[in-house]
Amino acid sequence: MSALLNIDNLQAGIDGTPILNGLSLSIQPGEVHAIMGPNGSGKSTLSYVLSGKDGYEVSGGDMMFEGQSLADMAPEERAIAGLFLAFQYPLEIPGVTNMTFLKTSLNAILRGRGEDEMDAASFLRLAREKSRALGMNDEMLKRQLNVGFSGGEKKRNEILQMAMLEPKLAILDETDSGLDIDALKTVAEGLNALRAPDRGMLVITHYQRLLDFIKPDVVHVMAAGRIVKSGGPELALELEKSGYAEYVGETVNA
Amino acid sequence: MLDAQSYFDRISGDLSGDVKARAVALAAAEAAGLPTRRQEAWHYTDVARLLSKATHDTLHNIDFAPLNPLMAVFDNGRLLAAPQASGVAVSPFHHDGATADNAVLNYNAALAQDGLTAEISGDLAQPLIVTTQGDAPVHLHHKITLAPQAKAVLVDNHMSRDYTNARFDIALGAGAELTLIRVQQAGHQIGTSEIMLAEGAQIKTVALVTGGALARHEANVAFTARGAHAELHSAVLGRGENHADFTYLIDHQAADTSSNTSAYNVLDAAARGVFQGKIIVRKDAQHVDAQMQTRAMMLSEGAEMDAKPELEIYADDVACAHGSAIGELDKDALFFLRSRGLGEASARYLLVAGFIEQVLAHIDNDAMADALRALVAQKIAAQFSVQGDA
């Protein structure tokens, strides 16, 4: 079976500063991988490089999504191909309602895949169903996108977008940051509901606590721009106890 | 440029009112001449230069039909038919030619051929739309009065391709409420609104400029008694060499009055936006709340925004503030939208439309707001060569 995502010896940086230094990782459909690592290890950079943010330069290695190289694809082409990034800091877009945004996004992706756009009534039904499942009321759909949303509401809104767009691979960048325990549970429930045999997830987190709620198949430790150790869910628990010191030290000496 | 004297001689036979007084006003106007950049209030708007520029903007018909409006259409400076409805008393245009303290108003005093003189009473359900259209230079002087407790929606729909000097005298009686919508899509306009608010009167102005080589919108608001409130919101969608200037004098003469002013400018190519807002709080005008903010989204290096807020406060117990934020299109927001499948053009469209929407959202009547949204959508789609999905 071909990998959903295969990253091989990826080197990338910003403004001439290397951040990813030969990162390799492979995710099969249905798998949930977690990447843990200290601040500054390049976790968020990885999420931006995978999703195609301007300013990040790939200087070596490959990132293949279902056998197709992501490197030359625009962010919207990656989204249409089935990649989704849940943002660490979801952006506020004044003057655009959540509903308008979701509809524009979903239809852009359907159009990009050569499928028919969704009519207004079907869209409304779908948006309401998905948002209610996440404990969001209809009022939140009418509000301006993320404007005045609490941290928890913003993160829930990211999961709503994911539920609407049904990506093949979701990258969750510090989705747990800024959430209290109740909000964390809601978000995790939403994510668990989206686990599927044909969908992969890459959960980027600094803390182990999110992984109490979303059980990963594989845990990677990232330091200084590459994966320095991989293992099962027990690796996350181990990190929680011992911290990142040994990995940071190792890479400094390497 | 317009030769005012020969123009005056030509039309003076048709002018109503005191022609001699008008000749005096004309002499005063000609002596001073149109404003130049040496005058502080005109520092950023070079009238002579801008009048020499052609205007190429497309005029779109705004679909007001769903609002079942009352229409007052001025075609090349003449009112085609007076609006008729109970609650609107229209008087024939009459001008006394009184000399004012600036050349723009003196030219208007001398040359105004027509204007809508209307007194509105009660709750006027239909919006009153004053459309200025044609391809000749015109001077218009409108006088709109709202009786105490009256409620109305007035639209200043500027569709002329040529020069317009328009004066609006707007007086709101005690407790009256007026929503004033202004739109300019093209042409050269110098507009002056003299707004008087009696006790508890409320005016909300939402202005939209989508084009024009010269769009000068000056408003002088006098809060004459307690409880008066004004909101002045403007949105500019400028490209090419569009020039849009909003200049306000917000004069809180009475205690317990409030104002809220916002100016949103999206400027592309070599477009220029000007905002000058002066808030005065007079000596005994305690408990005034006056807020003012300017926002500009610069889409090109050749575009320019000049923002000059001023506070002049003589009372000691007031809450006044102004803020200004000028920036480019938010790259992170652009990336966010693209990561959700929107092409770059669609993403830019949505961000610009959202920016302008923050002004249009002040319009309470959905059908009215939708009519302006449709105009904005057409303009942005033309600007970015995309079809709006929203």
Image (cartoon, helix red, strand yellow):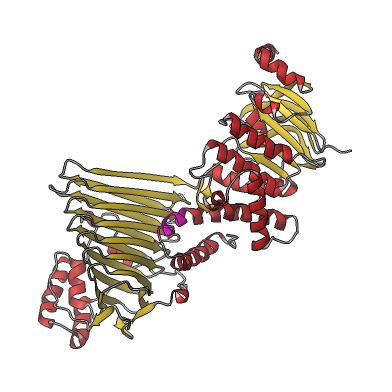
- The quadrant of the rendering that contains the N terminus of chain B is bottom left
Q: What residue span does the magenta drawing correspond to?
A: B355-362
Residue A105 appears at what percent x and percent y? 64, 52
Task: Provide the major secondary structure of the magenta segment.
Answer: helix
Instruction: Classify B244 as above or below B158.
Output: above
Residue farthest bottom in this picture: B13
Q: Which residue is found at the position 30% from the left and 48% from the top?
A: B291
| Left or right: B64, with B8 as reference point | right
Report the front residue among A34 and A76.
A34
Residue farthest right in this picture: A1
Residue A59 appears at what percent x and percent y? 70, 32
Residue B266 appears at what percent x and percent y? 44, 54
Q: Is residue B148 visible?
A: yes
Residue A228 image-quadrant placement: top right
Q: Does the magenta stretch include residue A56?
A: no
Residue B201 appears at what percent x and percent y? 25, 61
Instruction: Classify B45 as above or below B338.
Output: below
